[in-house]
Amino acid sequence: MTDYVESERLVLRQFTAQDADLLIGLDSDPAVMRFLTGGEPSMSDDEVRDEVIPSLLAAYERWNGRFGLFAAHEKATGDFIGWFCLRPQRTGPLDEVELGYRLRRDAWGKGYATEGSHALVDKGFSELGVNTVWGETMALNLSSQRVMEKVGMSVVESIPTPDEMQSVEGAERGGFRYEVTRDQWEARRDRSTAGRA
């Protein structure tokens, strides 16, 4: 088990071959999957064990542990609260990475999504040579939009809902692509530092 990044209250680590049940439990909550599948698990338990977990482990190898999907745990309790991702498109440039997150319902409303996202954005720009961090969310998913805005991302375009998500609530309204660039991140960091001086 390899820790990837820490924040004040969270530790993000690489998933292991023994972690399938964590993902299965997370995706079995209809509220968690509301804006992804309309509330249904996206895959069967066997698919998570036989396809998802091996794919996550292969991604760590492919990107030398620099990017991927990471299990998030509370430092205070050790409890699994969900996952965060920071990763390029499979065949895309390594300096353009997606930020994503999926948290257990009992972890909502505690600022964890923002805290973990801040840690990943900062790591991407300060350590990993990233030039752009992007994320996408549905127009109805206001909570996800607020998280992206809090970490300095802004809307760059409206996007249509993918075909496989047409049955999801609010699909007709589409979604948004958010981005933050290295220059924007550095300017925000500099303003923050100046404000504390």
Image (tube, grey):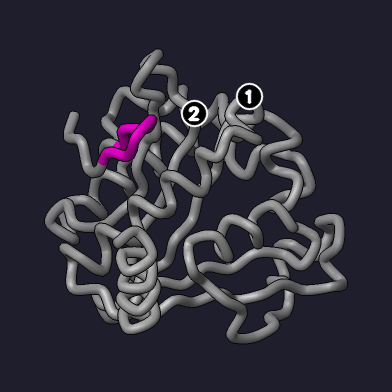
Q: Label 2 to label 1, Cα distance in Å?
A: 8 Å
Q: Residue 106: which numbered mark, if any?
A: 1
Q: Which amino acid type is marked by label 1?
A: Asp
Question: Can residue 89 be seen here?
Answer: no
Residue under the point 40% across and 13% down:
77
Q: Residue 138 in magenta? A: no
Residue under the point 36% across and 48% down:
69
Question: Can residue 5 be seen here?
Answer: yes
Where disc 1 sits, the SS reads helix
Q: Work out whether 34 lies above or below 151.
A: above
Q: Work out whether 183 lies above or below 178.
A: below
Q: Which amino acid type is marked by label 2?
A: Ile
Return the residue at label 2. 81
Residue under the point 43% across and 18% down:
79
Question: Disc 2, disc 1: CB below 8 Å?
Answer: yes
Where disc 2 sits, the SS reads strand
Q: Which is nearer the eye, 77 or 17?
A: 77
Q: Which residues are magenta?
A: 6-12
The residue lying furthest to the left in this view is: 64
